[in-house]
Amino acid sequence: QLQLVESGGGLVQPGGSLRLSCAASGFAFKDYAIAWFRQAPGKEREGVACISSSGDTTNYARSVKGRFTISRDNVRNTVWLQMSSLKPEDTALYYCAAVREIGLCGLWGQHYPNWGQGTQVTVSS
């Protein structure tokens, strides 16, 4: 059974950093592209970052490029989202999602059939 479990969220001051983790189990992780999405109250879901199955390709939303870094370890079946220079507008529930796809990754939510439960990130002083 495919499972994605996010962790690492919390409360952080503006300008601070957090690292989110997405632990995967129950499927051939190395064959799946993984993405992070976020949704703030009253706002649409937004694709934040994605990484291809091999880790060779990454894509970022314009709003986080240069501040967030996505990475993965196909032995530990884990994807991380390192978030730096956090802003109040980064406050949201962050989800990881998976799709069986080799070589590419995208930031459109409809492409991903498998989702975790999310971890809350709050950026506030």
Image: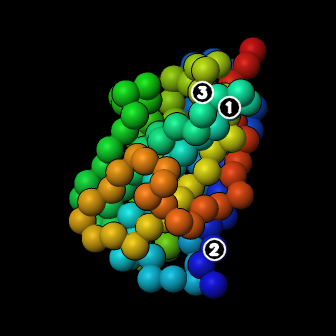
Label 1 element class = loop
How much space separates mark 2 and mark 1, taking CA atoms?
23 Å
Pointer 2 local density, CA inside 10 Å: few below 14, some 14–19, many at least 20: some
- The residue lying at 40 percent from left, 73 percent from top is 100
Q: Amino acid at mark 3?
A: Asp
Asked if one can make out residue 27 in the rendered structure from this viewpoint, the answer is yes
Q: Percent x, y for residue 96?
A: 56, 55
All told, the count of numbered labels is 3
41 w.r.t. 48: above or below:
above
Label 2 element class = strand
Which residue is label 3 attached to?
90
Towards the viewer: 4 or 42 = 42
How much space separates mark 3 and mark 1, taking CA atoms?
8 Å
Quarter of image, res 105: bottom left
| Nearest-to-viewer mark from 3 and 1 | 1
Q: Can you tell which mark lies on residue 3?
A: 2
Q: Quadrant of the C terminus?
A: top right
Q: Amino acid at mark 2?
A: Gln
Mark 2 or mark 1: whose residue is earlier in sequence: 2
Mark 3 or mark 1: whose residue is earlier in sequence: 1
How much space separates mark 2 and mark 3, taking CA atoms?
25 Å
| Nearest-to-viewer mark from 2 and 1 | 1
Q: Percent x, y for residue 62?
A: 37, 27
Q: Amino acid at mark 1?
A: Ala
Q: Quadrant of the N terminus?
A: bottom right
124 w.r.t. 62: above or below:
above
Label 3 element class = helix
Q: Can you tell which mark lies on residue 40?
A: 1
Residue ranking furthest to the front: 110
- The residue lying at 47 percent from left, 40 percent from top is 48
Q: Percent x, y for residue 76?
A: 49, 73
